Image (cartoon, coloured by chain):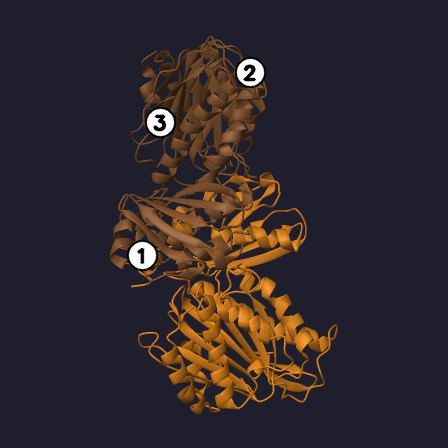
Chain colours: A orange, B brown
Amino acid sequence: MKKYNNKMLSVPGIISNGIHTGVKKSRNDLGIIYTNKGIAAGVFTQNVVKAAPVVVSEMNIENEVTRAIIINSGNANACTGQLGYQNAVETIKCVADKLAIDPKEVLVSSTGLIGKQLDMDKIIKGINPLIDGLSENSYHKFPESITTTDTYNKTCSCEVKIDGEWITVVGIAKGSGMIHPDMATTLGFLQTDVNISKPVLQSILSNIIVDTFNMISVDGDTSTNDMVIALSSCEAKNALVEENTTEYDHLTEAMLYVTKMLAISVAQDGEGATKLIECTVTNANSDKCARKMAKSVIQSSLVKTAVFGNDANWGRIICSLGYSGVSFDPNVVDLNIKSESGMITLMEEGVGLEFDETKALKILSDEKVIIEVDVKNGEYGATAWGCDLTYDYVTINAEYRT
Amino acid sequence: MKKYNNKMLSVPGIISNGIHTGVKKSRNDLGIIYTNKGIAAGVFTQNVVKAAPVVVSEMNIENEVTRAIIINSGNANACTGQLGYQNAVETIKCVADKLAIDPKEVLVSSTGLIGKQLDMDKIIKGINPLIDGLSENSYHKFPESITTTDTYNKTCSCEVKIDGEWITVVGIAKGSGMIHPDMATTLGFLQTDVNISKPVLQSILSNIIVDTFNMISVDGDTSTNDMVIALSSCEAKNALVEENTTEYDHLTEAMLYVTKMLAISVAQDGEGATKLIECTVTNANSDKCARKMAKSVIQSSLVKTAVFGNDANWGRIICSLGYSGVSFDPNVVDLNIKSESGMITLMEEGVGLEFDETKALKILSDEKVIIEVDVKNGEYGATAWGCDLTYDYVTINAEYRT
């Protein structure tokens, strides 16, 4: 597998574009992904309050063929009542008309402020130039078009050999607030040219979400608009990928790589974040327990502020494990922190150790801080990613609408 | 019932005291409550990681008689291994010796930094003057002795007629971080002179906790040290309070009042808080659902920062209801915000309304902001209390150990 993190390759048979319509101040705010004859898989937010585009796309993705995804940022089209649904449907129809395809083959996705009606004038007016501008070379304009408070675009690509053919997997995602995935998260778009059936693509997507997007949290808030869509042009010459084969495993590995890198990028660029926090739990007695414990640590406001302050206040880590909902024996737990600058054991067999505060400060000052927890209770592990809680998080979110 | 919020009355048959031993910089850090022949009820943290004093007190409260509670602040005696248990037990023994009572009749409670061994020299040395100073008039020194990052002492009292006798109920609690009760929260001590049996006192305490301490959150972190103890001197002349009687209801009402006021004080004085946030959910289809929804709102970092920024970003409120784990129809929900300055409906039947931003700003600028949610799904309601998320929260928690 050839890996290209933070890079967007072109995918055979898929083109995309992004433009600025004026919904956001200056950055691109309307994007499209198009393929001549594609199939799609998707995972959607588990929030009871689902934005109109989520409801509409969950319906449309049931169709055999998906050829286009239209995405706007700056407005979530959530809690917008009947008119919100109408606007989502009208956006789809307008895209289908312009592309001369069936509206059933179009998905729609939105992100931004909740509770305002879409500025349909700007969106409808934007669709023409957006689609006119679609070319083999316009794809680099797409990632920005789905961002909101992101400080950088999130892309990742890889190439992997499937049935003797090199196929491409590309992912684009956005952060960076209201990030606490439950079955899906944020907006994520995976593109590939692998020859695959819809159910097999869905199977891979559903499997990899659990260990990637569902293992990050910025603020504990599960969005109304989360969706991750995988779209394939099916143009590669490989024989159809089947479940329980080596080819399935290789493709899973490639899609897992791309999705994991995107998920980490979203955590790293969490609103106001200065650091990525990674928590790895080992030797838990199930996958589920390991995941719960790792997520509990990276979600704790007290852990997040301590990491921001370069404070090795490990009591907060063990406390957050304790309320994770998992039963374990705290008296056997080991706890390390590490980074590029080294590693320190803070707790052994449930008891705090004396440690070198200067070294701890150095470790915690790095951009990526790893918390390792060994619960000695089984053979399962999990990793979760989050970020520190900073003054800038408060600034960004105290003034979001203004 | 005569109510005295923010005031500590003296309780017949119970005396208390507090002193400064040097564990904390300047404020009192060791406190004691004593009664000649008392009975106690308690609720304790549900965190899997329980501090030594929690484990020891959970055991000791099983005994018929409880006569003293010793509390230190500044050090939680949590994650301190075997030595931590020994120190908790030694503290109890030292108190029992000095008071010439059975160690089984003593409870111990700690709050503060996790993972450091107690400075037993200071504590043991402090116990003598602490107990020597116990008098009818020393009780006003007690509340400060249990505080950590609190900006004020939390006390509430009331008097209620039970079986023709005026009895007194007094409560003292502490905040103001790692506050997210699960069955109990923080440290809370209720004192009364009502003549009551241990199981009936426990029954009342367990009932009122659910709607008071368990309905507040400052940071989502359930502490390792939470406990609420109710202690009665049983000195009042009323006939023993029995369940399913008017007297039971009156006493419940009095204890509920005191506990609720303490819980609100803890939320209001949450670390860095400038405002109390109250969320009331009405017409839910069960008590449990109403509680879950109300708590979900006051826990949301995005709601908390929006309130700090005086921003009526109600989409975050409906979003947090949506991920509360409760199933409901978002298309019928009404949402108001109100305060001393007035009331505004932000959402009706699931759709956002145009509203007067100046009025919203005025409402949100008040010290107590009320969020009202009508889910039109049943006849149950609940109220939860939290606080805004501010720069000072980050400051306090980035630098807690230093």
Amino acid, disc 1: Asp
Amino acid, disc 2: Ser
Chain at tag 2? B
Residue B207 percent coordinates (x, y): 53, 30
Residue A74, placed above or below residue B106? below
Q: Which is more N-terminal, label 3 or label 2?
A: 3
Image quadrant in which the N terminus of chain A is located: bottom right
Mark 1 element type: loop
Q: Which residue is mark 3?
A: B155
Count residues near mark 3 (Cα–Cα under 10 Å), then give few for <14, some for 14-19, many for 20+: many
Measured in 3D between alpha carbons, the distance from the residue under mark 2 to the one under mark 3, in whole angstroms, is 25 Å
Residue at 51%, 72% (x, y): give it. Answer: A188
User: Which of label 2 and label 3 is nearer to you?
Assistant: 2
Amino acid, disc 3: Thr
In depth, the one of B190 and A87 nearer the eye is A87
In depth, the one of B122 and A7 nearer the eye is A7
Residue at 34%, 13% (x, y): give it. Answer: B133
Instruction: Say the numbered circle drawn on residue B197.
Output: 2
Mark 3 element type: strand
Residue B223 percent coordinates (x, y): 48, 39
Q: Is residue A222 left or right of residue B395?
A: right
Q: Given contact means CB atoms under 8 Å apart, are the residues at marks 3 and 1 in contact?
A: no
Q: Given contact means CB atoms under 8 Å apart, are the residues at marks 2 and 1 in contact?
A: no
Instruction: Confirm whether circles 2 and 1 share one chain.
Output: yes
Q: Which residue is mark 1?
A: B311
Chain at tag 3? B
